[in-house]
Amino acid sequence: MSKKRFGLESIGYISHKYSKITLTIIAVITIFMWFGQSKIVFNSNVTDLFKDDSPQYHLFEKVNNLFSGNDDEFLLTISGENLLTVENIEKLNNFQLELEFNDDVMSVLSPFSMRDFPDENGSIGPLFPAEITSDNVEQVLTHAQSHPLVGGKLLSADNQLILFVITTKKQQVDVKQGEGRGLAERDAQLALRTRLLDLAKTQIADDTLAFEMSGLSIFKAEIIGYMLYDQLVFTIFGVLFGFIISWIYFRKMKFVVLAGLPTLVAMTTMRGMFGWFEIELDVLSNIAPILIMVISFCDSVHLVYGIRRRLEQGYNRDDAIKLTVRHIGPACVLTSLTTGIAMVSLLAAGHPIISKFGFICTFGTGFAFVVTLTLIPALARLILPQKMEMHNLVTGAEPGYKHPLMHRLLDGYTEFCKTIFMRWPLRVSVLALVLVALLSYFYLQNEPRYRYVDNLPQNNEAFIGVSKIEEKLSGTNEIRIFVEFDADYNLRSEATFELYQRIEAELAQTSFVKNTFSMATVRDYVQKNSTDKSVEQFFNFIDQNAGAVDGLLLEDSKQSLVIGLLPDTDASALLPELRILEQKLAIIDEEFTSAKLYVTGILPLSAQASYSMIDMLNYSLLLAILGGVLIVTISFRSIYTGIFALIANVIPIGLAGLYLYIFDEGLQFTSVVAFTIGFGIAVDNTIHVVHRYNRAVNDGLSIEDALRKTMDSVTSVLVVTSLVLGGGIGIVMISEMPLIKLYGALLTMLVFAALLTDTLLLPSAMRLFYNHKQKKKIVNSKTSEAATAKNSKLVNEFDLKYSSKNI
């Protein structure tokens, strides 16, 4: 790869020549972007993950707009063995009244807000009577369990858990200057949660009971909190880890500054871009800055390593900088290009949140490359002296001086790598091919998986509360059957309730559904004790109790819901059940011509969308692999180099796939995103190895000597950059968000697996192939020479014979 073939590294020469101007421009941009960080907008709505232009999402949005969602609901769970003693029942009843009169509360749904079955005259009283004693408490509880809206929905079967569904008023907040939209609302929600929890604990005053407050609005607030925490931890740890590794490796503060400053500039610019351009920071894009930071650091280490190496070899500062830009710059261009290709491939996923992440990372990769290749030459010219006196670290130790421990370990690993490809190149190459086949098989065995709860922070009070609801009640998720009647249809007919009952029956037979609810359920409740069980009598009752069925029926627009309650369920298990349900509902739909039936809800939407998203992401991964291999092939003008890159970097993906298979994690969308980005990063190692090998061969070295020279030059820096990548990305594993934690684990695994394949498998394959190619060339050359000699002999004999005849 010559300078002519890659012109982008020339910006390094320009920045070196005009170093002060370059640093001034970078400083101005960085300061401007720094202030943009205060304007960051947070988006904690996990439903947006499935937001697209599909009919399923439009239906979900339509139904949510028609029938009130649960965005402003707090779910308060109170549990314990002594929950429903006579004394505690009285306290819980009083707590219900306190909530109803609370200024922050719109309404409260609990067993103590429920009314008993209407009597023959339609009169209704409280489900829990005013007088409860030890004599009648068991009878009262048994009666409460029979209530269609209480048993299994608001009160557990063992009477040890009760649920209060609290709909809150929108909090009025003052957004502070520079705070960022959403933070004030978050603080207000968490403050309200604390007030209501304190009220419950004070009112009931029983230390044997457990209190948890959860709900979608709580989780949204918690997610923003964890995003802020993750940002702070990721940034501090990433910077400290990079500093420590740089210091151990370079042992000079000036080199540490050279390696670290471009990463800080790149990360600050990324975060400032979120603020200035009002790009919402979601759970996935929250990890983009740390990702770009470690990618930038890797290029920085390669360039600083090159400068130090040449200074140790006796070059002056300016020559060392120019030679580094000339020899390592093209490889940095190519690595940024292949990483960018991987990021761009995410745009093909077809889902806004993934495409946005791909766009952000593509921009970040490009900007990080520009910053690194301009800042390091300019800054090096200003802070490094023309000649530096220092011990050799990245070249052989001078007599009487011993390398530090880290460098001795790196030297030992380099010698080990050279031993592998010198002694067993054929065995290692065969092993690589076997691994490709075997690991590809295991990767393909992974089925798409997705659980909605995996988007939520865990190991906190809100998650514990939801887990209890999932375990002891009907769950927090719904399958909604949306029924849209014809405009002229009479809703107040027996046929309508026959339809409701048939839909409920099919829902009840669906696996995972614990409870169902519809207008038919309400009618059974209202008319249980009535002698008149006509439709007219039921609607007379509804008319007299305005708003009683607003969550189930919009009579004016002829729209209704039938609801199935269920706990959070994996998409791979739920989707087959949904398809069966849709087939059954299609039969009902055909028979009942006056209405259309649709299946919706966050769980059905996420199950269907996750499958299609993972399919599209697999295509994105394929595009990233093919694009990266194609770029490498064209750049090195060798199809075999492209094959080397493919084999060396598909194996790490296969190993990560094997991990998912062994631990039954399945293929989640963050897994495929990690594979896509991981391939783009991992192929960088291959590029540096092949680039250095080509330079050694062009210098006249033999294949073996060129590979030895290559491993001496790049192995240690590949290990260091992999440590930084693995450590920097691996920090996200401490996140409380399960999908982000899995993303970090897989990407870290890919980075270290790629290091092994590029330092152990790749040199063996290169030695084996290039020796075979050379031998074939020699044989062809000898064959050609023999043929030429033979032809020459025949010509001479012919000429001699022809000449003798003429004589």
Image (cartoon, rainbow, N blue to C red):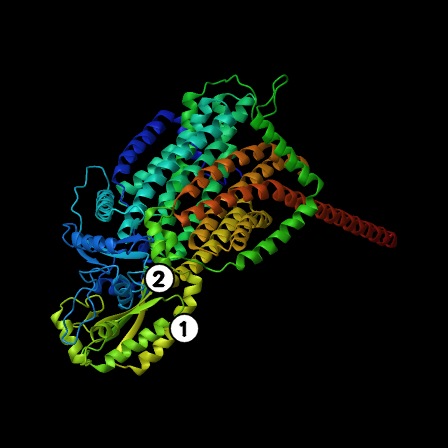
Task: Tell me if residue 802 comes above or below residue 503 in the rendering.
Answer: above
With respect to residue 765, does 597 lie above or below? Answer: below
Q: Specify the amino acid type for callout 1.
A: Ile
Q: Quadrant of residue 755?
A: top right
In the rendered view, does 751 fall on the left or right side of 94? right
Helix, strand or loop under label 2: helix
**Which image quadrant is residue 396 in?**
top right
Most extreme residue toward the left, as rendered?
A: 544
Q: Are marks 1 and 2 in contact (CB under 8 Å)?
A: no
Secondary-structure class at tag 1: helix
Q: Which residue is mark 1?
A: 580
The residue positioned 56% from the left and 46% from the top of the image is: 637
Q: Position of residue 105 (x, y in %)?
A: 17, 52
**Residue appearing at x 30%, y 74% in the figure:** 597
Question: In whole angstroms, how far apart are the C-alphas of marks 1 and 2?
Answer: 16 Å
Residue furthest to the front in view is 135
Residue on which the image places disc 2? 603
Q: Quadrant of the N terminus?
A: top right
Residue 280 visible (yes or no) = no
Seen in the picture, residue 231 relative to 304 is either above or below; the reply is below
Foreground of the two, 794 or 395 = 395
Residue under the image location 23 percent in, 38 percent down: 179
- Of residues 456 and 231, which is closer to you in this image? 456
On screen, residue 527 versus residue 459, left or right, reads: left
**Percent of width and height locating residue 132:** 21, 60
